[in-house]
Amino acid sequence: MSKVEYVARDTDELKPATGRPRGRPRTASDADRRAGILKAALRLFQAEGYAGTTTEMVAAEARISKQTLYRLFPSKAELFRALVIDHRATMLELPLQRAGLPLDEAIAAVFRFDLSPEAEQERRAFVHLAMREGHDVPEIHAILREAGPDASRRMLAEWLAAQAETGAIVLEDADSAARMLMDMLFGAMLHFSDPRHGPPTGPARAARLVHLKRCVRTFLDGVRPRG
C-alpha cells in the first residue's frame, strides 16, 4: 500500500491527497491549530530570526491558511508574545497546581526542579533565542519586559506574599524576595549548565539538585518567623 500524504486546505481540514476518503474529514480545533502554529513559528524564529520570519512563512510551515493564522494571531508580534507566555510555564509553575506541599517542596515545584533534561534543553534554547532577539529587536525587548521575566517575578512575588499572609514566612518586601529567590535559583541552574552541551546529566545533575535544595533552605531560613 502506498503511503498516503495529507495536504492542508484553507478550511484547515485534513484530507487524503490520494485514495478514497473514509467518513468526514477531521477538522482541527482552535487549540490544535494554535499549538501547531506556535511550534511552526518557534522553528522559524530559531532558524531565520524574528526579522527574517514572515507570517506567510509561518502559515506555510503550519500548513494553514493566512486567514486562520490572522484570526488566532493578528500579528507576528502576537505570535512571539504567545511563545513567551507559553515558555513562562517552563520557568515557573505559577499558579502552583499542587496544594498542601511543605514550603521547600512547593518552591522546588514552582521552579520546576523536576523538569526533564529534554524539556530543560528546550527551555534553554528559547532563553537564548529571546536574549538574542531582545537585544536586536526593540519590539521583542518590549514584549519580554511585559510578558517575560518581569511578569514571572510579579507572579512569584504574589505567591510569596500569599505565603506571608498565612504566617508561614515573614517578608519586608515581596518583590525584593522574589528577585532574590530567582537570582539564587536561576543563577545556580546557569552555573551548573555547560555552554556547549546544555543542562547537566548524570552525577552533575544530581549535584545541582542538592545545591538547589540547599539554596531553598538558605532562603527559607532567612524568611521564616523567629521565635
Image (cartoon, rainbow, N blue to C red):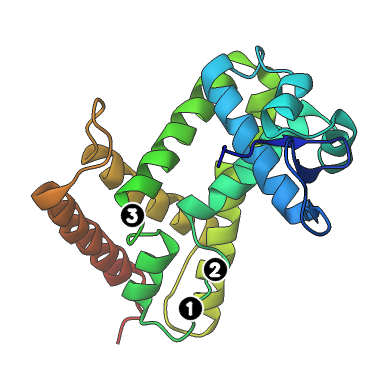
Residue 45 quadrant: top right
Estimate the spatial distance between the alpha carbons at disc 1 and disc 3, rounded to whole Å.
18 Å
Instruction: Classify the position of the C terminus by image quarter.
Output: bottom left
Mark 1 vs mark 3: give the one in front.
Answer: 3
* Tag shown at residue 192: none
Residue 212 on image: x %, y %? 24, 57
Give the amino acid type for the residue marked by disc 2 in the picture.
Trp
Taking the spot 40% from the left edge, 48% from the top edge, the residue there is 119
Q: Residue 116 carries which label?
A: 3
SS class, disc 3: loop
Would you say residue 75 is visible in this rendering? yes
Q: Tell me the crowding category of disc 1: few under 14, some 14 to 19, or many 20 or more residues within 10 angstroms, Cα based.
A: few
Residue 26: image location, x then y, percent: 78, 55
Question: Judging from the image, what secondary structure is the residue with disc 2 in?
Answer: helix
User: Residue 98: which numbered mark, if any?
Assistant: 1
Asked if residue 144 lies left or right of residue 173, the reply is: right
